[in-house]
Image (cartoon, rainbow, N blue to C red):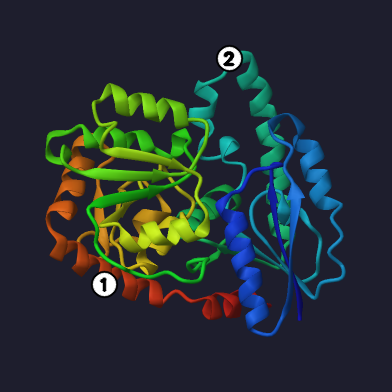
Amino acid sequence: MTIGVVTSAPPGVEGGHLVIARALAGALRRLGHDAEVLTTPDYGFGQLTRTYRAALATDVRRFDQVISFRYPSFAVAHPRHTCWLNHTMREYYDLWPRFAASISWRNRVKEGIRGAILRRADAYLLRRVTRVVAQSKTIQARTARDFGISADVVYPPAPLDGYRCDEYGDYVFAVSRLEPLKRLDLLVRALAEAPARHVRAVVAGDGEQASALRALAAQRGVADRVSFVGRIDDRALLTHYARCRAVCFTPYAEDYGFVTIEAFASAKAVITCRDSGGPAELVEDEVTGVVCEATPASLAIALARLVDDRARAERLGAAAAARAARITWQDAVARLLL
């Protein structure tokens, strides 16, 4: 079969959904299908109509089936269409209270109207696809709440080749876009708490909060124990996963977060928070990692316990690797094809 893997992205922005889309296309090819990744444009808040029209106009007739991801890529029209939903435009859904609080009352009225129109459009488009599959239970719950659609869950497997465990080193690794919802400031603040004042961390990624996080580290007196290495390539990423003691991934209400499954594939425990969404689904407390409260003090305790107890980190890491081994691309493809 010829499969179109369709997602959307703002110009120049590399999101996790693009990584997963490319990995899915690669898995489809390995299993004997022709697969191509198409990216529909996302023009941002002020140009939603243009964004959705571009997706609607995308010609996918040459494919036997399409598999779409985030908004508005699920707007493409095809008689055999699986939407492996990553997320809708969350500012008009679960993040509306946070978004509305950040804008003026006039803009709240305007964006409220725009959001109502968008939600109606999304409901129509998602009901038009052949089948909706969620990338996590968190997304499954949103899909049921927002659209009344019952979706199965298929977790994306780790997207790269070459995951390995070289050692359980002396630092905690974190990788993410540096933006507010990823809560890297929580890690920086935790390093300043008493239980974790000897813990070292390496943070990879870039984004709007890069300068603010470095300033926070200096302010809290931990600049000598946290290294911000910026955006790194796949080889460096795999090396950090292979050599760190554990992975810290504490976003707020994350859709899925493939950092978790990447860490598991590298036999590393993951420290996450109870309100982290997708990561908290995969991390079983004291089995494949640690699930703590979203406070610096609670995170500091979790960090220190894994850094101070290598045997514990190894035990949790081994269980994490076994969990990752059960989430395969072969199974994902079988469940996504119609």
Name the element at disc 2: loop
Q: Amino acid type of disc 2?
A: Ser
State which quadrant residue 245 falls in: bottom left
Question: 20 above or below 1?
Answer: above
Residue at the spot of label 2: 104
The spot of residue 223 in percent (x, y) is: 29, 31
Whether label 2 touches label 1, CB < 8 Å: no
Q: Is residue 215 left or right of residue 329?
A: left
Residue in the image at 29% along x and 21% along y: 219
Residue in the image at 30% along x and 25% along y: 218
The spot of residue 329 in percent (x, y) is: 54, 76
Residue at the spot of label 1: 318
Residue in the image at 60% along x and 36% along y: 92
The spot of residue 79 in percent (x, y) is: 80, 69
Q: Is residue 150 left or right of residue 169?
A: right
Q: Earlier in the sequence, mark 2 or mark 1?
A: 2
